[in-house]
Amino acid sequence: MTDPFTGDDWLVLKPLSPDVAVVQVQVADEEGNAQILGPRWENEEQVKASKRTIVITERLVSTEMIRREP
């Protein structure tokens, strides 16, 4: 595809739409709220693009704890 502003040629791809994203987090609650402590890499984009998300957590905590330290 040609950029209408610069005239440069660009390769255009259809966006990915995976069925499932699997995300590893440090803490999560029973309602599905999760916290990633440290680098997030592409987790947010993967979750937004997928139809469903599986969250694997190291520790299950209360919802109040997640809300206290968002």
Image (cartoon, rainbow, N blue to C red):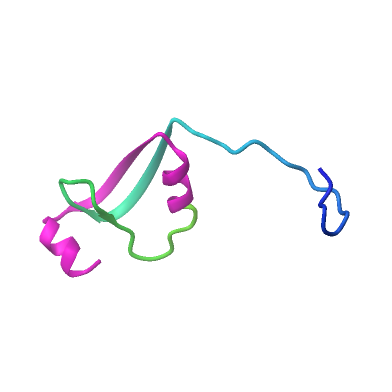
Residue 51 in the image, given as x and y percentages of width and height: 41, 34
Pick the front one: 70 or 8: 8
Q: Quadrant of the C terminus?
A: bottom left
> Does the magenta-highlighted stretch encompass residue 53?
yes
Residue 56 lies, with reference to residue 26, above or below; the image says above
Q: Is residue 66 left or right of residue 8?
A: left
Residue 52 lies, with reference to residue 36, above or below; the image says above
Q: Quadrant of the N terminus?
A: top right
Which quadrant of the structure image shows residue 66? bottom left
Pick the front one: 7 or 28: 7
Question: Residue reaching furthest top?
Answer: 19
Residue at image coords 85%, 48%: 9
> Does the magenta-highlighted stretch encompass residue 45?
yes
The number of numbered badges drawn on the structure is: 0
Residue 56 lies, with reference to residue 18, above or below; the image says below
Q: Is residue 31 left or right of residue 43?
A: left
Residue at image coords 81%, 52%: 3
Residue 8 lies, with reference to residue 21, above or below; the image says below
Pick the front one: 64 or 22: 64
**Range covered by the magenta-colored residues:** 43-70
Residue 61 in the image, given as x and y percentages of width and height: 14, 55
Pick the front one: 70 or 37: 70
Residue 37 in the image, given as x and y percentages of width and height: 33, 64
Question: Residue reaching furthest bottom?
Answer: 69
Residue at image coords 82%, 53%: 4
Q: Is residue 5 left or right of residue 51?
A: right
Question: Residue reaching furthest right?
Answer: 7
Residue at image coords 13%, 56%: 63
Q: Is residue 18 left or right of residue 36?
A: right
